[in-house]
Amino acid sequence: MEPDKLTDLEDKAWMREALKLADLAAAEGEVPVGAVIVKDGVLISAGRNRRELGKNALYHAELEAIDGACKALGGWRLWQCDLYVTLEPCPMCTGAIINARIRRLCYGAKDPKAGSCGSVVNLFELPYNHKPQVISGVLEEACAERLSGFFRSLRERKKNGER
């Protein structure tokens, strides 16, 4: 199999793992965002959005995954790691990706309100000392549907007076 096709298949497989975490987040009433960090084809860490449960603005899927990877690998430099996340990272998470030296970022759905990898702004274009390879649109439709379905359901519940 051609290397690019193999990479595409691997990217989709890892994004499916991130989608499982997004589904867990949604089941907990969180915005459905999931993330996994992979090194040499092995899952190192995973995270999901937990801002509502944790009542903390820092509890994003990417930050949870980066924190877990740093602990698992015993250091803050994740230069041999790839991050898969279902939603384009926000400015905070994009900064964490830069600071952790993530090698590759693969994300699914674009975020037209806070996306900082091209949608609102591209922080990777600024003269920081690290620029990961970015692959956007991996299983984009499935990732976007998780988000739109979650918000559709939330609006419906609010309309019906539910919490």
Image: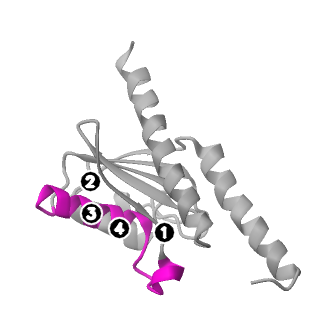
Q: Which element carries disc 4, helix, strand or loop?
A: helix
Residue at the image position 58 percent from the left and 72 percent from the top = 30
Q: Position of residue 76 (x, y in %)?
A: 15, 63
Q: Residue at x 65, y 60 (%)?
A: 147
Q: Which residue is mark 4?
A: 64
Q: Is residue 65 magenta?
A: yes
Identified by mark 2, the residue type is: Ile
* Mark 2 burial class by Cα count in 10 Å: few <14, some 14-19, many 20+: many
Residues 149 and 116: in front is 149
Name the amino acid, label 3. Gly
Examine the rendered structure and indicate whether residue 152 appears above or below residue 144: below
Label 4–label 3 contact, CB within 8 A: yes
x and y, in percent, of residue 2 in the image: 38, 15
* Residue at mark 3: 68
Q: Residues within 10 Å of mark 1 (few under 14, many from 20)?
A: many
Q: Amino acid at mark 4?
A: Glu
For marks 3 and 1, give the CA distance: 14 Å
Mark 2 vs mark 4: which is more N-terminal?
4
Pick whichever of labels 2 and 3 is earlier in the sequence: 3
Q: Provide the residue designation for mark 1.
A: 49
Q: Which residues are magenta?
A: 51-76
Q: Position of residue 66 (x, y in %)?
A: 29, 62
Marks 2 and 1 sit apart, C-alpha to C-alpha, by 19 Å
Residue at which label 2 appears: 102
Q: Are marks 4 and 1 in contact (CB under 8 Å)?
A: no
41 or 24, nearer to the observer: 24
